[in-house]
Image: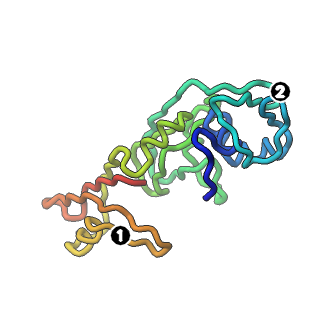
């Protein structure tokens, strides 16, 4: 992962942080020659900028940090948390008004999961909420069989994923009256 000096980010990320577009969409704008920084055209999506100090323009129009917008969405099961789905499934963006400014999800919920999903253009808030050690994420979980003591012990100890990362321990409280249901509290994404 490329590191940037304090207060700076890549131009594609700056456009995202300013609420203009997703990073993918920002990359397209930059490569299509629509973006300039301090009066100079920029063609490199990874160009280093300070979004609070640079004068960034898209198609000659100055960009300023958008007013913070946070949306609380009750995501239903059967909807994906993405802007576009290659399988043609409904996305959370299909549930939002079409005239909203750019917002991105804070975290994800699986296709079959339902519950609170926050979307925002405030990347500082998104970083705070999603970062490890940020705020706790509480999930009500129901599975097709009772939770076993062994499975609970694994969650409580932290898990090693196949691709390498070690996940932080999870608080797990199983409902003794309904052993297929539990409350999980996560401190990381």
Instruction: Read off the residue under disc 2.
Output: 60
Name the secondary structure under disc 2. loop
How far apart in space, not on screen, are marks 2 and 1 (Cα)?
49 Å
Where in the figure is residue 50, as x and y percent of width and height?
A: 65, 36
Q: Local crowd at mark 2 within 10 Å, few (<14), some, or many (≥20)?
A: few
Instruction: Give the colouring mode of the picture.
Output: rainbow
Image vertical order of residue 39 relative to residue 186, above or below: above
The x, y position of residue 129, in whole percent, is 42, 42
Front residue of this view, candidates 143 and 183 = 183
Residue at 43% in and 54% down: 189
The relative height of residue 141 versus residue 51 in the rendered view (above or below) is below
- Above or below residue 152? Residue 95 is above
Quick one: 145 or 148, which is closer to the camera?
Answer: 148
The image shows residue 118 at horizontal and vertical percentages of: 46, 40
**Residue 159's mark?**
1
Q: Residues within 10 Å of mark 1 (few under 14, many from 20)?
A: some
């Amino acid at each position: 992962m490329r590191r940037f000096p304090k207060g700076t980010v890549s131009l594609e990320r700056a456009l995202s942080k300013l609420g203009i577009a997703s990073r993918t969409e920002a990359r397209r704008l930059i490569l299509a020659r629509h973006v300039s920084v301090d009066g100079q055209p920029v063609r490199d999506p990874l160009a280093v900028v300070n979004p609070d100090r640079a004068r960034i323009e898209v198609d000659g129009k100055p960009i300023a940090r958008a007013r913070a917008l946070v949306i609380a969405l009750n995501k239903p099961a059967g909807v994906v948390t993405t802007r576009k789905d290659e399988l043609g499934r409904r996305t959370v963006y299909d549930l939002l008004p079409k005239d909203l400014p750019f917002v991105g999800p804070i975290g994800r919920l699986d296709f079959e999961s339902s519950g609170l999903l926050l979307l925002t253009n405030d990347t500082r808030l998104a970083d705070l909420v999603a970062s490890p050690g940020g705020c706790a994420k509480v999930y009500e979980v129901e599975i097709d069989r009772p939770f076993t003591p062994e499975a609970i012990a694994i969650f409580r100890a932290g898990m090693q994923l196949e691709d390498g990362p070690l996940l932080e321990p999870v608080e797990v409280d199983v409902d003794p009256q309904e052993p297929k249901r539990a409350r999980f509290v996560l401190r990381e994404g």
